[in-house]
């Protein structure tokens, strides 16, 4: 009976440890993986060398130009965090100023927003955006259409990427 109790206790401890690990930062993917996944899903994907502070950058668009997906591998974790936090602050500040109506959420390594910008200096109109940060990697998925079909298309490519 003691052996069974120890076995059950061990299984419970391992289950709890795995569930806590699942709550952490999203997994990091490479630029090569990103490009392969996007091209497999018929997105036009090109390397973007204009982004300063990054080692690797890609930008991809679906065939209808509805969804834009960007991948940046920053030179440091702090640069990636700075970009991620600045994006969140942009939405929060716009919402606080009444320039963004809609919803946004932030969890460990994932930020999403869906709504409408008005009278904002950076954005105008509808926007759905999801930003994933893991280590020094940042993935941005965005669309300027918050209709159900377009949001579903953006969410589908996020799922294909593993998020």
Image (spheres, rainbow, N blue to C red):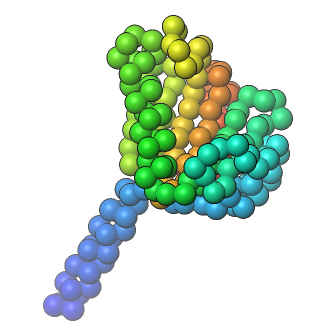
On the question of residue 160 being in view, the answer is no
Left or right: residue 104 compared with residue 74? left
Q: Where is residue 63 in the image (x, y as percent from the top left)?
A: 83, 35
Q: Where is residue 153 in the image (x, y as percent from the top left)?
A: 68, 35
Name above or below for residue 79 compared with residue 123.
below
Q: Nearer the viewer, residue 4 or 39?
A: 39
Q: Residue at x 75, y 42 (%)?
A: 60
Q: Position of residue 16 (x, y in %)?
A: 29, 67
- Return the residue found at the far left: 2
Left or right: residue 18 compared with residue 150? left
Name above or below for residue 6 compared with residue 97.
below
Q: Position of residue 157 (x, y in %)?
A: 67, 44
- Return the residue found at the far top: 119
Q: Which of 43 and 53 is in front in this view?
A: 53
Q: Which residue is drawn at 44% across and 44% down?
A: 82
Q: Residue at x 62, y 38 (%)?
A: 141
Name above or below for residue 43 compared with residue 23.
above
Name above or below for residue 3 compared with residue 132.
below
């Amino acid at each position: 009976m003691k052996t069974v109790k120890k076995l059950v206790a061990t299984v419970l401890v391992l289950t709890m440890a795995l569930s806590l690990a699942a709550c952490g930062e999203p997994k990091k993917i490479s630029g090569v993986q990103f490009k392969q996944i996007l091209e497999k899903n018929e997105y036009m994907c090109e390397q973007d060398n204009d982004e300063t502070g990054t080692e690797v950058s890609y930008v991809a668009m679906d065939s209808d130009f509805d969804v834009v997906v960007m991948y940046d591998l920053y030179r440091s974790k702090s640069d990636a965090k700075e970009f991620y936090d600045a994006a969140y602050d942009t939405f929060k500040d716009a919402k606080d100023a009444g320039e963004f109506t809609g919803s946004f959420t932030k969890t460990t390594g994932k930020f999403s927003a869906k709504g409408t910008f008005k009278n904002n200096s950076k954005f105008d109109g509808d926007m759905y955006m999801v930003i994933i940060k893991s280590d020094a990697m940042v993935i941005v998925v965005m669309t300027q259409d918050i209709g159900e079909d377009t949001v579903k298309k953006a969410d589908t490519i996020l799922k294909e990427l593993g998020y």
